[in-house]
Image (spheres, rainbow, N blue to C red):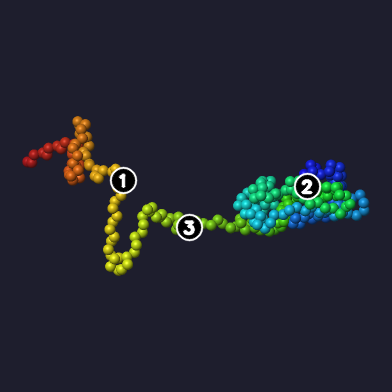
Amino acid sequence: MLERDGDTARVRRGRVYADQGAVSRVKVEPGEATARVEGSRSGAYRVSVITPVPGGEEWATLVRALGSQPVFRAALLAGGFPPELERVFEVVGLRLLPGGLGDLVLSCSCPDWGHPCKHAAAALYVLAEALASDPLLLVEWLGRPRGELLADLRRRARTPAAPADPAAALAEPPAPGVAEPDPPDDAAGFWRAPRLPAPPRLDGAPPAVAITEPPDAGGEYAAEAPQEGLAELLAPLYQRLIGPQQPEPPQE
């Protein structure tokens, strides 16, 4: 970002300052990173790098999003910083890293009005190295102390999910379309059973179903006998199942 958007000559000079150890007293605070940079003149210049920070509600949303993912939560608690976290910030509408120098407010006590000056460029190089070695500094720069973030993630890791109600899970669902009868108004009515509802009838269904015998050996059906009893209707079937009866031996 610095080499793409900054003045080439000043950025190159700032890189030399950073490599020579001219940057010291780097401090990262919520929304601002400061440093002291030794220049060609005597004395050091004070550099400030300011970035916008998410608000309280936005951080609450981020903590919920990070805490709901065990992989992210475990990595952060172990001191890591998965690169996929940048995508999490984008999903909630925030930016983890600045997209360009225009997203930062740079200031330096030197008389150079370049954007950035070589001292600010040197401070940005050292700040980038500090964030690479300790990624959680980026969280503090964005306004969330690492101790608070890790404490929130630990609480979410210890909070179990709400268990389902076993009684509700085993409860029998109510029968659809059946209304509960109204309770009786007096004691005598408690012992009187209400009239049973009429059985449902489908449109076009016959009023009665006739029971017929199975086909005989000739392939013809027996005549319908809806008025006969069940035993009489099944008697021919029983006879065919048991076969012809053997005559009993004569009595001596």
Residue identifier under label 2: 101
Please give the name of the residue rendered at 79% of the width and 52% of the height, measured from the top-left corner.
Answer: 105
Q: CA distance from mark 1 to mark 2?
A: 77 Å
Q: How many numbered marks, from 0 up?
A: 3
Provide residue 232's location: percent of width, then percent of height.
17, 43
Q: Which quadrant of the figure has residue 195?
A: bottom left
Furthest residue in direction left, as rendered: 252
The image quadrant where one finds the N terminus is: top right
Nearest to N terminus: mark 1 or mark 2:
2
Give the residue drawn at x 28%, y 61%: 193
Secondary element at image label 2: helix
Can residue 108 be seen from the camera position used here?
Answer: yes
Disc 1 residue type?
Leu
Relative to 219, is 189 above or below?
Answer: below
Estimate how packed mark 1 is, as few (under 14), some (14 to 19) or many (20 or more) residues with alpha carbons within 10 Å. few
Circle 2: residue type? Leu
Q: Is residue 78 left or right of residue 45?
A: left
Q: Which mark is residue 202?
A: 1
Position of the C terminus, as image quadrant, is: top left
Instruction: Provide residue 120's location: percent of width, then percent of height.
Output: 83, 50
Q: Residues within 10 Å of mark 2 (few under 14, many from 20)?
A: some
